[in-house]
Amino acid sequence: MSDLAWVPRSCTLPTAERPLRVAEWDALFAAGPVSLSRPEPLRLRLVLAGGPEVGERVRELAERESGCCSFFTFTTGRGTDRVAGRHRDRTAGRLWLDIAVDPAHAAVLDALAARIDAVAAR
């Protein structure tokens, strides 16, 4: 998915910088997400392995992305060690990143989910 045609017009990142930003996200996705889920139609949850340095990298990248694509809402956190029924929370101690969009940008979220799957599968 090297074609950036799916990037919406509302993105204010200069066109020449878009491939560099995509490469930053790809590097994060290639580092091995633990899981990707879609808990709601307009929200992805990406659970990542790694320590504080990964968390800082994710927060910094999400902040820059919000600056040019204001339709994204990024939320980060660490899973808690809790048990639901007989199952331990798979996010316990791991960094998670929620990526949400408004209904007008659902296709962008679909494309992002497909890209995460493709990059992680390499």
Image (tube, helix red, strand yellow):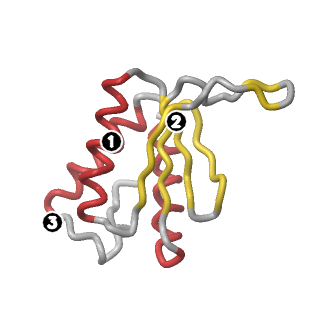
Near mark 1 (Cα within 10 A), the count class, few <14, some 14-19 or many ≥20, is some
Question: Which residue is depicted at the point 45% across and 49% down?
Answer: 75
- Is 16 rendered above or below residue 51? below
Q: Indicate the secondary structure of the residue bearing disc 1.
A: helix
- Is 102 rendered above or below residue 111? below
**Mark earlier in primary sequence (3, 2):** 3
Percent coordinates x, y for residue 73 in the rendering: 42, 59
Percent coordinates x, y for residue 15 in the rendering: 17, 66
Q: Nearer the viewer, mark 1 or mark 3?
A: 1
Near mark 2 (Cα within 10 A), the count class, few <14, some 14-19 or many ≥20, is few
What's the distance in space between the residues labelled 1 and 2, CA to CA?
Answer: 24 Å
What's the distance in space between the residues labelled 3 and 2, CA to CA?
Answer: 29 Å
Label 3: which residue?
A: 14
Pick the quarter of the image with the N terminus.
Answer: bottom left
Q: Nearer the viewer, mark 3 or mark 2?
A: 3
- Is 98 rendered above or below residue 69? above
Percent coordinates x, y for residue 94 in the rendering: 52, 27
Q: Please, which residue is most extreme toward the right here? A: 86
Percent coordinates x, y for residue 40 in the rendering: 65, 59
- Is 86 rendered above or below residue 108? above
Label 2: which residue?
A: 121
Q: Say which amino acid is labelled 2.
A: Ala
Q: Say which amino acid is labelled 1.
A: Arg
**Mark earlier in primary sequence (1, 2):** 1
Question: Which residue is depicted at the point 34% across and 61% down?
Answer: 3
What's the distance in space between the residues labelled 1 and 3, CA to CA?
Answer: 21 Å
Question: Which residue is depicted at the point 39% across and 69% down?
Answer: 71
Label 1: which residue?
A: 59
Near mark 3 (Cα within 10 A), the count class, few <14, some 14-19 or many ≥20, is few
Question: Which residue is depicted at the point 34% across and 44% down?
Answer: 25
- Residue 8: mark in rendering: none
Closer to us: 3 or 74: 74
